[in-house]
């Protein structure tokens, strides 16, 4: 009896391994990233702005494709004084070749967003903090008021807990919020972050 049980379990394990090996591989639909709360987004940012993407141009950066977007600044909570910023994101299309990175921020021309940006390779390159976590879409609600919507599209957000274990975690913004209210909270966090 025991021999049959061992044989049966061994056969089932072998069949499940074979089935897994024969199934076609599927592309991933999310990148795993550490969840950042609003305070962490503010702290990691060199520039925090509300802006509109005016242009976008994809190019090769070595073997990968990146997109440089020009964002016209409407409001600034942290950073310099330039009226426009150049933001570089992973992915895009150059000719017939495209590259998509799940969880990477994507700035469509004409879209308005609250952007948390950090300086990368040199002072000229700005990238969103925490991939798509650093780009929060701004739209108008049915009453015509500006509302910020959750970002982090394409990301599986995790937080490290005791023993280094990863567990699912919420995004910095879980539901839409009025832009003026969120900007006031961000300005308060910037003041605390920059205090001596």
Image (cartoon, grey):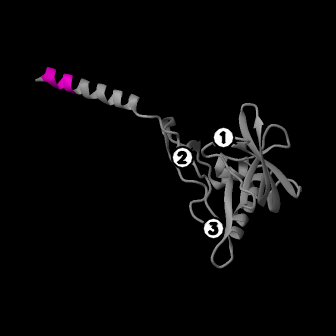
Counting residues from the N terminus, which is met first, the one under dot 1 or under dot 2? 1
Task: State the SS at label 1.
Answer: strand
Between marks 3 and 2 in the image, the one whose residue lies nearer the viewer: 2
For image coordinates 83% across by 59% down, the residue present is: 72
Report whether residue 195 is seen. Answer: no
Query: Dot 1: within a 10 Å radius of its alpha carbon, few (fewer than 14), some, or many (20 or more) residues?
Result: some
Q: Earlier in the sequence, mark 3 or mark 2?
A: 2
Q: Nearer the viewer, residue 171 or 43?
A: 171
Q: Which residue range is magenta in the image?
A: 2-8
CB under 8 Å between callouts 3 and 1?
no
Q: Nearer the viewer, mark 3 or mark 1?
A: 1
Location of residue 148 (image quadrant): bottom right
Coordinates of residue 76 in the picture (x, y in percent): 81, 60
Closer to the camera in the image, 180 or 136: 136
Quadrant occupied by the N terminus: top left
* Residue for badge 1: 99
Q: Quadrant of residue 34?
A: top right
Q: Which residue is mark 3?
A: 177
Looking at the image, is mark 3 or mark 1 earlier in the sequence? 1
Question: How far apart in space, not on screen, are marks 3 and 1 (Cα)?
Answer: 32 Å
> Based on the displayed image, in which of its 4 quarters is residue 141 positioned?
bottom right
Q: Residues within 10 Å of mark 3 (few under 14, many from 20)?
A: some
Disc number placed over residue 156 in the picture, else none: 2
Toward the top, the furthest residue is 3
Locate residue 84, reporting x and y percent.
Answer: 86, 56
């Amino acid at each position: 009896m025991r021999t049959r049980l061992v044989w049966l379990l061994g056969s089932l394990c072998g069949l499940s391994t074979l089935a897994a090996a024969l199934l076609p591989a599927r592309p991933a639909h999310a990148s795993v990233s550490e969840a950042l709360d609003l305070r962490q987004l503010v702290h990691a940012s060199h520039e925090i702005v509300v802006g509109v993407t005016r242009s976008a141009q994809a190019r090769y950066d070595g073997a990968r494709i990146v997109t440089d977007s020009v964002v016209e600044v409407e409001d600034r909570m942290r950073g310099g004084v330039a009226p426009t910023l150049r933001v570089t994101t992973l992915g895009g299309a150059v000719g017939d070749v495209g590259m998509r990175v799940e969880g990477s921020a994507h700035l469509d021309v004409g879209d308005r967003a609250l952007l948390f940006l950090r300086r990368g390779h040199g002072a000229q390159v700005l990238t969103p903090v925490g991939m798509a976590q650093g780009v929060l879409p701004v739209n108008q609600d049915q009453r015509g008021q500006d509302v910020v919507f959750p970002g982090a599209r394409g990301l599986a957000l995790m937080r490290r807990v005791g023993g280094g274990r990863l567990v699912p975690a919420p995004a910095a913004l879980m539901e839409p919020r009025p832009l003026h209210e969120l900007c006031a909270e961000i300005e308060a966090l910037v003041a605390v972050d920059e205090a001596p």
